[in-house]
Each structure stands twice: as structure tokens, then as C-alpha cells.
Amino acid sequence: MGPGPGNPYPEVMQALTRPVLGHLDPEFVALLDETCERLRQVFRTGNRLTVPLSGTGSAGMEAAFVNVVGPGDVVVIGVNGVFGERMCDVASRCGAEVVRVEEAWGKPIEPERLLGAHPSPKVIAVVHAETSTGVRNDIAPLGEGKGEALLLVDCVTSLGGIPVEADGWGVDIAYSGTQKCLGVPPGLAPITLSARAEERFVERSPSWYLDLRMIAAYAAVPGGTARTYHHTAPISMVYALHAGLGVLLEEGLDAVHERHRVCGEALHTGLEKLGLELLVAPSHRLPELTTVRVPAGVDEAGIRKALLERYGIEIGGGLGPLAGQIWRIGLMGHTARLRNVATLLGALEELLRP
């Protein structure tokens, strides 16, 4: 139940045991194509360039920037946690002029502040679900007001847990990771780019490995050139993602989002009944990632250790300025079950009892 990798769906574990095919084997190529189509359904987009990148969510972040940001480009970035901060680092390495829009950790960023931060940025970037704080930032108003800018969104912790409407919100670039609400082990970074984003690619990406022009040719995206070798894809991970997306689509995205919502609300209510204070206001809390203030006098790391050793439950600690001050509790993918909520609440009640 930590903020990192959780228990994969059983179907995913079974997929990982399939015999490994060559990465250009016709059977694997057909499965890769179907995986890309399933990703379009989960991102709710018609974007032709929608693929699973070989790498974790941070590779998705880097690919998102190195393909559209060059020296001198203005990039407005929302910073209210670790991953907004990381976006600034990646953009600056591309030579961008970074305009930071900061908010206190634990609070959402007002869309108007991002839209008004610069008159003509090339990119406006923000984290949808900030894993370090449990905050949801609003995306739809940014799509409505972005003007000529590209809208780039980190969906690592949101995809599969809460609604993500890439096309409906006007998102040009979105990336995620497999290990959160998709219920798949870490190793792939789903990414989707609009035609508008493709038209504004830099002339030559500084990263060979993450060059989306070459990756698009390898994945043979619709309307592109014939399939061209780029790198050896992690075959078993693509098997796993194909299976995990299948589980989500079979359950139904709306039903999956509702399951996460119900579990999140049950956890929030239960924690407050234990006298614990939640970091984030109700209007922008994530159901899949809950942040709890550590009560005064309580051994923050000691409680986490006891949960793991006595009950087999892992929760995360705080990062950055929140280190030692909060716990981060994940309910993502297969772990978003009411029985897990009840187990955790019972364990915390025992450990925190005077």
C-alpha cells in the first residue's frame, strides 16, 4: 500500500510467465499494436503517437521534454511537490527558460497562475496527481486557456485511478508509469502526444534513446512509415502491460475510477476517526494516494517499520520538506480494495493506541 509499486493484478503475473518472443516477431508486434490501442482507450485519446516507452515514469517525463523543448524555449512549470521540481530540472537540462509557478506542498496550483505566468510559453507543464503530497491539480482549465502553448501533463499516479481525459482536456503530451494505478510492475512509461505536439518537435532530440520520431517508426504508429528497428523492447513487460490494460478495460474505466474513489473515501474517513489529520483539503485529495500528518510524539519511521514487519503493510514516508512529517498511503490498481483499507486501519489503531 505504499506510493511505489503495489501488488500487480494476478492476470499480469501470469502474463509475465509467457515464453519470450523476439521483439520483431509477428506475434509480439501484433500484441504491441494492441497494447498501443488499449493505451489510447485508457488515456481517452485518438492520438496516433501513443506508445509504451521502455523505461519507468521518469523516462516518460524526460521523453516529454527532450522532444519538444530546445535552448531558449520558455516553459512554465507548476511546482507543488517533488515531481514538479523534477520537471524543472529536466526542462533546464534542455536549455529551456524555466518559469516556476510555486505553491505550498499539500495545496493545488490555481490554473490562472499557470496561464498568467508568461505571455507566450512554448510549454505549460504540471503534475496531475502529485505523488509526494497527494494533491490533484486541475487540468481542464489549462487546456481551455493554453493558447499557442503545448500542455504537458504528468499522469504517473493518476492514469487508471482517477479520470484522465487527454483529448477532452486539450492535453498535448501526457505520460504515466505502469507501477501505480495500472497495476503492472515498473518498467514502462506510457506516453501520448497530439498531432499538434508532433508538429512542434525540436529539429533533433538531444536524446537518441528517447527520440520519439524514431520510436514512432519502431512502433509503426498509424499513418507513419514502415516499422524500423530502434531498440529491443522489454518483451515481458509489454506482455504485462497488455494484460493490465485488459483488466482495466474489462472492469470498465468508470468502474475502476469508482472503486478507487470508494476506497479512498473509506480510508480518509477511517483515518480521521482515528484522530489523524490529512494533509490535503477534501476538494483536491487523491483517492489513490493519501497523505497523513504524523501526530506529535509519534515515531514516524518506527510506525512504518512496525506496519511492514508485523502486518506486511508498506506505506511511504514524506519527501523533501515533508520528510518525517507525513505518511503516504497508496491504494492503487489491484490494492484498491476495501479489505485492504480495513486491514490498514486496524493495524494503525493497534500501533497508535496509547
Image: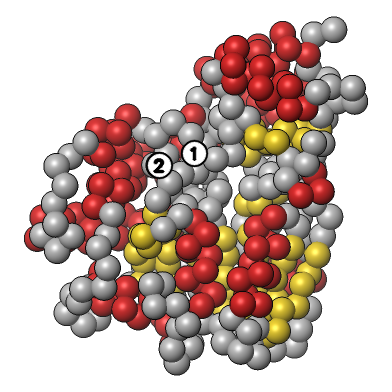
Left/right of residue 84 with respect to residue 247 in the rendered view? right
User: Which quarter of the rendering shows the C terminus?
Assistant: top right
Point out residue 264 in the picture as x, y percentages from the top left corner.
62, 32
Q: Relative to 266, say whether 220 is above or below.
A: below
Left/right of residue 278 with respect to residue 13 in the rendered view? right
- Residue at (70, 36) in percent of width and height: 317
User: Which quarter of the rendering shows the N terminus?
Assistant: top right
Point out residue 103 in the picture as x, y percentages from the top left corner.
82, 60
Amino acid beneath label 2:
Pro
Residue 296 at least partly seen: yes
Which quadrant of the structure image shows residue 138? bottom right
Residue farthest to the right, as pictured: 296
User: Upstream in the sequence, badge 1 or badge 2?
Assistant: 1
Point out residue 230 in the picture as x, y percentages from the top left corner.
26, 73
> Does the CB distance between marks 1 and 2 fall below 8 Å?
yes
Point out residue 328 in the picture as x, y percentages from the top left corner.
68, 36
- Residue at (80, 44) in percent of width and height: 322
Checking the image for residue 5, the label placed there is 1
Residue bearing mark 2: 185
- SS for dot 1: loop
Amino acid beneath label 1:
Pro
Residue 287 at least partly seen: no
